[in-house]
Image (spheres, helix red, strand yellow):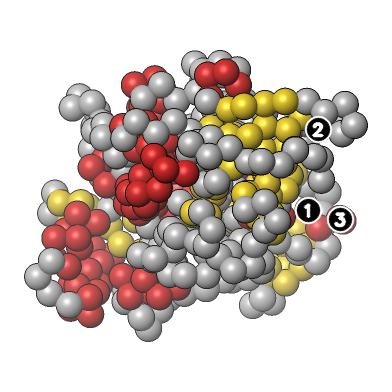
Amino acid sequence: MAAAYQYCPPSEMEAKSFNDPLFSKRCVWVTSPLIVGAGPSGLAVAACLKNRGIPSLLLERSSCIASLWQEKTYDRLKLHLPKQFCELPLMPFPPEYPEYPTKNQFIRYLEEYAERFEIRPRFNQRVVAAEFDGTVGYWKVATEEVEYFCRWLVVATGENADEVLPEIEGMEDFGGEVMHSSKYRNGERFKGKKVVVVGCGNSGMEVCLDLCNHFALPSLVVRDKLHVLPRETFGWSTFSLSMWLLKWVPIGVVDRILLALAWLKFGNTSWLGLDRPSLGPITLKNRFGKTPVLDVGTLDRIKSGHIKVKPGIQKLRYRSVEFDDGTSDDCDALLLATGFKSNVASWLMDDETFSMKDGRPKKQFPNSWKGERGLYAVGFTNRGIFGASIDAEKITDHIQQFWMVESRHSPTFACQSI
């Protein structure tokens, strides 16, 4: 779906720009906060700032907003959580939307959100480096063509910026198709083919279900223990139920209730090859960020034998896979539902706020949003859009405290290229 927003000239961004023929990059002084990333997190911050009368400059590496949703998701995708937990600040979903909006409905919502708050990102602007320049007291943010100086830098590239591509022995000799789930749209072209799906999160489970619906022959590689919960229980969203229970009882009690409901729905899943962790689903999510799978029908296909569950992959051979339990199977295609990761460590030079190992904030939620010297993080809470919306409002509150005073001061230095 094409984005409906055009490149916004500097004059509309309240920036003062000037050129120096001695240097290869154009320098731009930005009087407002600079946001990197035009996904839901970046849009939320820009809208909250706009609502307080604070403009922003939003840089996006792709050609559209929410590029992950528009360019890297499968056709049948719906929000895994009820829509009230996926709303951005200041604008609810249309009342006619279903409880679990489709991918296209969510994209339409984001486009309407950007239109309402007049958010106009600068597209095709990949940030290649950013650091705090202590000599002048500003953040220096470089794209391939422009170098920006700003007082406030908001990192909104999130937890899902780049694909995780595992190295598997023998991949170069496999001979079949290998693709990441970000390139999977539907199972139509895999009809009748044996497909091994690596990764048993929500995406991996749902991709397997989609392959079944298109008459493929999928196997699901499950390397770790995981919690599988019903998406709905007695007509209630399981997530909504857990949020309601947490208002009244401790996490441990809620975990036991959720596990009892899962047992009633699925029985013992260990015989299917799906062992549960010792920690409960909410405890595991809070401590390690590991999200439980919300089942949308995959377990029924596993029970019926239409989806095989396999342990980890030992090695790939030509058109076949050897598993950790010593078994092997023919394979036409390998689909990597191995998720995404932050790319912050590749361009942001700041090891105080972000870990240079995994590109995530060092502080844990609910304090992960605030860094030092005007640096902020949004979309790194392991709590999805709901967590990003909370962070967006906190960031806006903090910037507003200093906006009226500091935005009036222009730097006294001459811009130079790095």
Residue denoted by label 3: 172
Q: Is residue 5 left or right of residue 227?
A: right
Labelled pair 3, 2 in contact (Cβ < 8 Å)? no
Q: Residue at x 64, y 67 (%)?
A: 351
* Frontmost residue, 219 versus 63: 63
Task: Identify the residue at the far right of this view.
Answer: 22
Q: CA distance from mark 1 to mark 3?
A: 11 Å
Residue denoted by label 1: 319
Q: Position of residue 161 (x, y in %)?
A: 60, 48
Mark positioned earlier in the residue sequence (1 or 3) = 3
The amino acid on which the numbered mark 1 sits, given as a three-letter code, is: Arg
Secondary-structure class at tag 1 = loop
Q: CA distance from mark 3 to mark 2?
A: 40 Å
* Frontmost residue, 406 versus 299: 406
Task: Identify the residue at the far front of this view.
Answer: 412
Total number of numbered discs in the rendering: 3
The nearer-to-camera label among 3 and 2 is: 2
Secondary-structure class at tag 3 = helix
* Frontmost residue, 29 versus 203: 29
The amino acid on which the numbered mark 3 sits, given as a three-letter code, is: Glu
Q: Position of residue 217 (x, y in %)?
A: 57, 48
* Frontmost residue, 388 versus 400: 400
Residue 227 appears in the picture as rendered: no
Q: Is residue 287 left or right of residue 247?
A: right
Residue denoted by label 2: 25
Disc 2 packing (10 Å; few <14; some 14–19; many ≥20): many
